[in-house]
Structures are given as C-alpha cells and as structure tokens.
Amino acid sequence: MESDVVKKTITTTSPEETQALGYALAASLRGGDVVLLSGTLGAGKTCLVTGLAKGLRVRSSVSSPTFTLLHTHAPQDPNGLFLHHMDVYRLNDADAFLHLGFYDLIAEDAVLFIEWGCQVRDVLPHDVVEIRLEQLSDDVADDDCRYVTLEAPLSKADRFVKAFEDWEEGHRAADDF
Ligand SMILES: Nc1ncnc2c1ncn2[C@@H]1O[C@H](COP(=O)(O)OP(=O)(O)O)[C@@H](O)[C@H]1O
Ligand SMILES: [Mg+2]
C-alpha cells in the first residue's frame, strides 16, 4: 500500500504562503477529487482552503465549518467546480458521515475537502488524497513555519505533485524580487 502512494513535503513560512499553495492546487483539481486535511488545531487547514477557494473562483468566502460540518461554495463560472468544505472534528462516528448523506457530495461537478478527514477515511473511496499540515515546533507559539505533506495515490499523484511544484516555482520567482 505504502508504495502506491507518492509523497511530497514542502515548507510554508506564512499564512499567505499556505494560501498560495491552496491557490496553486485549484488548477490541478478535477471533479470528484476528495482531499483529507489533517493536522492539529491551528495547523492551517482552513487557511489552505481559503486560498483554494480563491483559485476556484467561488462566490462565497471561506470560514471554518466547525459547527455546521459543511460549507458549500458555488463557482462563479457555470462550468466551474463546487467546493464542499467540511470539518468533521465533531463527527464522532465515521458511519454518521454516510447516514447524514455526505457521501453524495462526491460528484463530478465538485471537489470535497475535509478537515480532520482521517476520522472518516474508512468510509471514503480508496483514492483520496491526504494533505498533512504540521507546525515545525510544538513549543514556539509564534512559529509561522509549517510542513505541508502531500500523500497522493498513483492515479492522482501527477496532478497534485504538479500543484506543489507550481507553488515552489512561484515561491522561487517571488524570492527573486
Ligand atoms: N505557515 C502558515 N500556514 C498557515 N497558517 C499559519 C501559518 N503560520 C501561521 N499561521 C496561522 O495559523 C492559524 C491557522 O489557522 P487555521 O487555518 O484556522 O487552522 P486549522 O484550520 O488547521 O485549525 C492562523 O491563525 C494563521 O494565521
Ligand atoms: Mg479549520
């Protein structure tokens, strides 16, 4: 199983950089993609989705769906992708994900991003992508660096790795100024 997954880690050094990664990701997405976002509270999961929403050019702005579980953002372009943004931290039981009908969110005209998604992984398709955000140091409250690790199945690796590489490229270009 492990060898069927492609991994790539980058480091962002500010919330803006994590948003820029989300923005870059938007260009690589296809309808039906499911992405699990993992990492502790404050790791930057919602921050990544904020940049993603800009890249997808959705109509509404992103806030944390902590209490409602789900926010759906419609695209401005009629041919664009819907963004379903979930936070399943409060969903104790993976089966509840199915019972509440959330599986139907996986559709050709939409992408599904799930904060704390590992909690419901067992009831999701096998080809989900995981993006893990980690603060570099536990004890430095103001540390703005994050490791961002992509784990993509081979069938999706090219597209997602490209997004990470595009971010690196843009990052290097920005450094040149
Ligand atoms: N490199 C970084 N990437 C993302 N967020 C960062 C970074 N550095 C600092 N932050 C801060 O960390 C917090 C992340 O919050 P949020 O995205 O809501 O986290 P989560 O959804 O994982 O709980 C924000 O206050 C953001 O400004
Ligand atoms: Mg969040």
Image: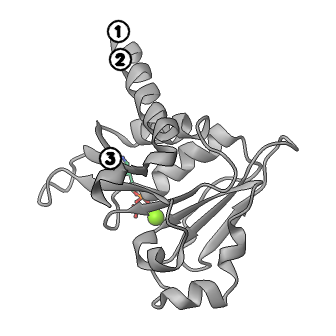
Assess whether mark 2 and mark 1 are in contact (beta carbons under 8 angstroms): yes
Q: Residue at x 88, y 44 (%)?
A: 78
10 Å crowding of disc 1: few (<14), some (14-19), many (20+):
few
Residue 116 visible here = no
Image coordinates of residue 24 in percent, x first then y, are 53, 34
Label at residue 119: none
Q: In the rendered structure, which amino acid carries the disc numbered 2?
A: Arg
Q: Does the residue labelled 2 lie within 8 Å of ligand 1?
A: no
Residue bearing mark 1: 176
* Residue 39, image x, y percentages: 33, 63
On screen, 69 above or below 34? below
Q: Label 1 sits on what residue type? A: Asp
Q: Name the residue under label 3.
A: 148
Task: Using residue 174 as the reference point, say whether residue 83 is left or right of it.
Answer: right
Farthest residue to the right: give it: 78
Q: Compute the Cα span from label 1 to label 2.
A: 6 Å
Residue at x 77% of width, y 49% of height: 59
Amino acid on which the number 3 mark rests in the picture? Val
At 18% from the left edge and 50% from the top edge, which residue is drawn?
136
Which element carries disc 3, helix, strand or loop? strand
> Foreground mark, 1 or 3?
3
Q: Name the residue under label 2.
A: 172
Name the residue nearer the viewer: 96 or 71: 96
Helix, strand or loop for disc 2: helix
Which residue is more in the foreground, 168 or 60? 168
Q: Measure the alpha-carbon separation of dots 3 and 2.
A: 17 Å
* Image position, residue 87 (x, y; %): 52, 72
Quick one: which residue is furthest to the left in this view?
A: 139
